[in-house]
Amino acid sequence: MKKIIVLALSGVLLGGLAGCGTDSDDSANSSSTTQKTSQSQTSSEATTDFKVSVADAIKAYQEAYPDSDITSIDLETSFGNYLYKIEGVDDSKEYEIQIDADTKEVSKEREEALDTEEQDGVKRKEDKLDLENLLSVEKVADIATKQVGSGKATDWSLDKDMGTTYWEVKVEDGHKETEVKIDAKSGKVLETETDD
């Protein structure tokens, strides 16, 4: 009888200790998850902290090519540095310029003659972006990450389709990439596409 009581008490004690160990592990895991989440939020915030705004990049492009219209803007990383790649067009040529998002240094200027069917304002009229009242990179990054639910914005493209100027934001979350199209003026989510 004593052996049964001792065994039962031992079982209860071991169960209690195991339960304590699990609670401890859970709180350690919870703490670790909290740290990872806050690190991920910090890196997401740091990603959108550019010294050169889209408006500054547009101005730099317009200073280089004053009589042309902008047809696309990309903000992406190259060897660890974020660069704006801006393309534009006038009636006879298309242009490309890169602007460092931290230093505003301009590089890789390119000019190329338009194909005959694109000249005399044809391409200019088709592809010209509406740059008035654009939402900032920071704002669309926030909209895109909220749409996806987690992750961080890594690349931005400003483009036009069927008369609508929109931001396309790439959000990375581990191995999952999601591209979110957002109306560049209203902030309305137009489309979401996920690549696993």
Image (cartoon, helix red, strand yellow):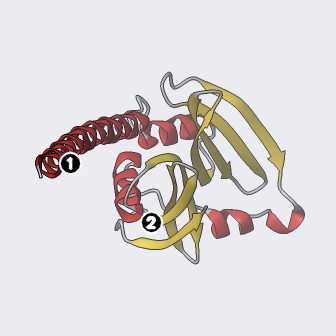
- Residue toward you, 119 or 56: 56
User: Is residue 133 something one can see in this rendering?
Assistant: no
C-alpha distance separating marks 2 and 1: 59 Å
Choose the circle earlier in sequence order: 2 or 1.
Answer: 1
The residue lying furthest to the front in this view is 1
Query: Disc 2 on helix, strand or loop?
Result: strand
- Residue toward you, 44 or 117: 44
User: Is residue 144 something one can see in this rendering?
Assistant: yes
Query: Disc 1 on helix, strand or loop?
Result: helix
- Determine the residue positioned at 38% across, 33% down: 46
- Residue toward you, 107 or 132: 107
Q: Are marks 2 and 1 in contact (CB under 8 Å)?
A: no
- Dot 2: few (<14), some (14–19), or many (≥20) neighbours within 10 Å? many
Q: Amino acid at mark 2?
A: Ile
Tell me: 24 left or right of 72.
Answer: left
x and y percentages locating residue 87 in the rendered image: 66, 48
What residue is shown with label 2? Answer: 182
Q: Amino acid at mark 1?
A: Gly
Location of residue 166 with respect to 138 vertically, above or below: below
- Determine the residue positioned at 30% across, 35% down: 35
x and y percentages locating residue 149 in the rendered image: 37, 60
What residue is shown with label 1? Answer: 11
- Residue toward you, 17 or 98: 17
